[in-house]
Amino acid sequence: MQTAKEKVKDMGSATKEKVKQFAGKAEAKTEAATAGTPEERAAAEERAKAREKEAKAEYHEEKAAHRDESAAHRGAATTHVPLTSYHHDRRVGADPAYPAAGTRPAGEKYL
């Protein structure tokens, strides 16, 4: 689950990405408007797409960095520890008093 700090950082990164995308679109429109030939317009569109992809790549890199920061901050305890207490790990036949029966005694039927 994400921490609040990660979410805030991710929202900031998403905002930066959107700003870069819209700036790239605006630059592409001005380049397309000033372009004289269809080849120049196509080149302007390609540059705009490249800017958008670059912004998205930066966003994902920042997002990964946020995950790494929070994982490093939490330390090695990032994995889930299974429940192995008396009530959670009661295998049938594991009781040495009843090794051959393979079932629980009647008194422990509903535990």
Image (cartoon, grey):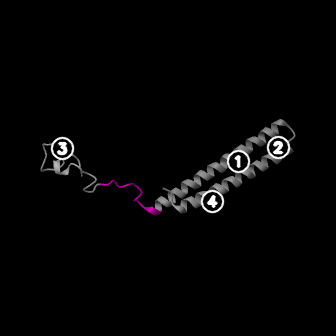
Numbered badge on residue 51: 1
Q: CA distance from mark 2 to mark 1?
A: 15 Å
Q: Nearer the viewer, mark 3 or mark 1?
A: 3
Q: Which residue is mark 2?
A: 32
Q: CA distance from mark 4 to mark 3?
A: 57 Å
Could you tell me the amino acid type at mark 4? Gly
Give the SS element for disc 3: loop
Q: CA distance from mark 4 to mark 1?
A: 19 Å
Label 4 vs 3, first from the N-terminus: 4
Badge 4 vs badge 2, beta-carbon distance below 8 Å: no
Residue at position x 71%, y 55% in the image? 19
Numbered badge on residue 12: 4
Q: Nearer the viewer, mark 4 or mark 3?
A: 3
Q: Nearer the viewer, mark 4 or mark 1?
A: 4
Around disc 3, counting alpha carbons within 10 Å, would you say few (fewer than 14), some (14 to 19), or many (20 or more)?
some
Q: Please indicate whether residue 83 sits to the left or right of residue 106 in the image.
A: right
Q: CA distance from mark 3 to mark 2?
A: 78 Å
Label 4 vs 1, first from the N-terminus: 4
Locate residue 108, reporting x and y percent: 19, 51
When asked about the image quadrant of residue 13, the answer is bottom right
Q: Nearer the viewer, mark 4 or mark 2?
A: 4
Could you tell me the amino acid type at mark 3? Thr
